[in-house]
Image: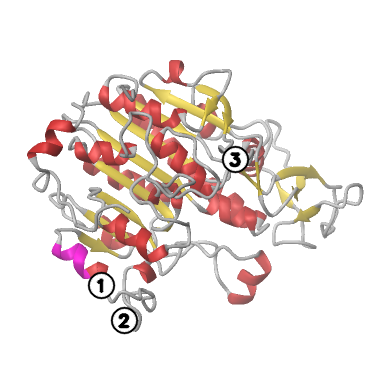
Amino acid sequence: MRSARLILLPLALGLAALASAQEPTGRGAIFFHPDGASLTHWDAARMRYAGPDGALNWDRYPYSAPYRGHMSDRLVSTSNGGAVSHATGTRAHAGSFGLDPDDREMVSADGTTRTIVEAAIEARIPTALIQTGSLIEPGTAAFVAEAPSRGRYEDIALQVVESGVHIHLGAGEQWLLPEGVQGRFGPGRRTDGRNLIDELASAGYTVVYTREELAALPEDVERVFGVFAEDHSFFDESEEDLAELGRAPYLETAPSVAEMTRFALDRIAGGERGFLMVIEEEGSDNFCNRLNASGCLEALRRADEAAGLLLDFVERHPDTLLVTAADSNAGGMNVIDVPWGLQQVPERDPSTGGLLDGEHGTGTAPFFSGPDASGRRFPFAVAWASASDLGAGVVARGAGWQAGRFIDPAGVHNIDIYAMLYETLFGEAPSAD
């Protein structure tokens, strides 16, 4: 397990650590992970929001290739195993949260036990982790934490807090406070008695809880920890359950993934040592695993907003690498035509028995697409293959520095993400020699 000490870089870096760190190139590197989003997810989002002849921001990325996300012991990725593979450049087993099958710390492709984010921190490169889910979600947490299992939430949260990352924006207040301590959103669940909110403040972080508080931070505040919800900043329930609770899919007071991304870019990009950002929209996975088509489409709309912001940044700063991919296909989301005039989508496809969703869940009115080039809008339903993650149909895309070389038309493997980020930041391919 990673050392339990708060790190304030660069002041806390010892001479030995500085000597072992790679010298940075000064370039920026961004990995954007819209979790669970496959090609068919993006197709559905395009039809819904841009229309069948329109284009998403995601469509503007100049390079694309199939993503290959298998694990060392199975074909379909887990969120934790996929994140470990991204973070280390070493293909993980399905149960891994930074440890190998013998519970030893994973060795990264450069021969060390540092993830790409830890290598950046050690080299005094500004870093940001952005997450719409809880801070214990592996899509970002596995870049700075390790544990015997994904369910070790207290240990994972502690390591995220103690990682030394410059900016962390996410949720999961319950894992930052002791049991019996009431937070901004709800009670704490830690059993070790530690108040990590207080520890963050003592370590020099400014803790914020809402979109407004984030936006109001003075420009000279450098270390920020966003805690925007008790658990996730979205409510990953079925459409029917959300309607019964009177809840929108996302917490209104929490910043969107695009808003968090814009804040972090403004704070850490542009320095002489470069920067590294790992960004995850978690709702696009969780809503699809709940077979909530409306929630998933909203998550994809938000992810596409961030995709456009990131691409605009890279077009202005072409010495930055931007790569985006999911680790698996959540639910096998797809689009199916329904007849004009149909008032209620059937619960299942009569020809295959597959689950169907209308705009407000099963047995509700169909979705309508955005207008096509002639102004026509079309009714459709969302068809689901499964409530699980599937192992095909994911596409990696990229832009910016060397993206045309990194995005191999034959496929981008999960372990390639680390190599792309590493070479961008340090000017050479990772090597264990």
| 97 sits to left or right of 377 | left
Quote the CA–CA distance across marks 2 and 1.
9 Å
Closer to the camera: disc 1 or disc 3? Answer: 3
Tell me what residue is drawn at x 66 percent, y 30 percent. Answer: 53
Q: Quadrant of residue 188?
A: bottom left
Q: Residues within 10 Å of mark 3 (few under 14, many from 20)?
A: few
Mark positioned earlier in the residue sequence (1 or 3): 3
**In the rendered view, would you say 41 is above or below 299?**
above
Q: Quadrant of residue 342?
A: bottom right
Name the front one of labels 2 and 3.
3
Question: Is residue 409 at least partly visible in the picture?
Answer: yes
Q: Is residue 291 magenta?
A: no
Q: Residue at x 27, y 56 (%)?
A: 215
Would residue 317 be visible to someone looking at this image?
no
Amino acid type, residue under disc 1 in the picture: Asn
Is residue 327 toward the left or the right of residue 31 in the image?
Answer: right
Quick one: label 2 or label 3, which is nearer the N terminus?
3
Q: What number is the disc on residue 73?
A: 3
Q: Residue at x 52, y 18 (%)?
A: 408
Q: Principal SS element in the magenta part?
A: helix
Residue 25 % position (x, y)? 22, 23
The type of residue carrying mark 3 is Asp
Labels 2 & 1 near each other (Cβ < 8 A) = yes
Give me the C-alpha separation between circle 2 and circle 3: 41 Å
> Which residues fall within the magenta stretch?
198-202
Name the residue beneath numbered marker 2: 181
User: Residue 176 at what x, y percent from top left?
Assistant: 32, 68
Q: Horizontal and vertical percent for residue 185?
A: 38, 74
| Pick the front one: 315 or 322 | 322
On the image, the x and y values in percent for residue 134 come to 42, 60
